[in-house]
Image (cartoon, helix red, strand yellow):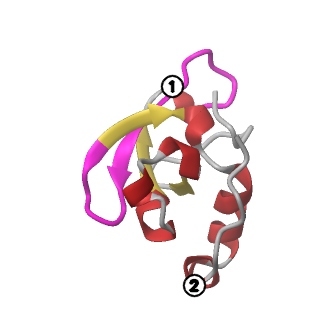
């Protein structure tokens, strides 16, 4: 189960909510996460864990599927360079 309400492909890059990140890592480049596994990749399962790594430094981690930002992920996947160059609105809680 995840915030995108669709299956996430293995290797797909998603954007995490700012509220899911420590303050020092809330910039756009640190919010990119490459999803590699977990029940949270499937939108119809009960499990929500997503495993993968941060794009910026390759650190392996896992997160809750609801920590994925739907709007930011959609914008990033449509035009990664434009999204990375943009600025954030206040993150919905």
Which of the 4 image quadrants contains residue 87? bottom right
In the image, residue 7 above or below residue 45: below
In front: 1, or 20? 20
Mark 1 element type? helix
Q: Which residue is mark 1?
A: 39
Is residue 59 visible from the viewing direction of this image? Answer: yes
N-term mark: 1 or 2: 1
Residue 36 image offset from top left, x and y in percent:
40, 44
In front: 61, or 93? 93
Q: Which residues make up the magenta segment?
A: 41-60
Residue 71 image offset from top left, x and y in percent:
74, 57
Q: Which residue is mark 2?
A: 85
Question: For the residues carrying marks 1 and 2, which lies nearer the camera in this image?
Answer: 2
In the image, residue 67 above or below residue 22: above
Q: Residues within 10 Å of mark 2 (few under 14, many from 20)?
A: few
Tell me how far mark 1 sits from mark 2, CA to CA: 32 Å
């Amino acid at each position: 189960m995840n915030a995108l309400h669709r299956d996430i492909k293995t290797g797909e890059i998603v954007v995490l909510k700012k509220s899911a990140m420590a303050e020092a890592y809330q910039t756009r480049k640190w919010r990119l996460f490459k999803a590699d596994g977990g029940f949270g990749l499937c939108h119809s399962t009960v499990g929500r864990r997503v495993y993968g790594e941060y794009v910026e430094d390759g650190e392996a981690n896992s997160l809750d599927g609801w920590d994925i930002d739907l709007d930011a992920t959609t914008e990033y996947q449509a035009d990664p360079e434009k999204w990375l160059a943009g600025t954030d609105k206040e993150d919905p809680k």
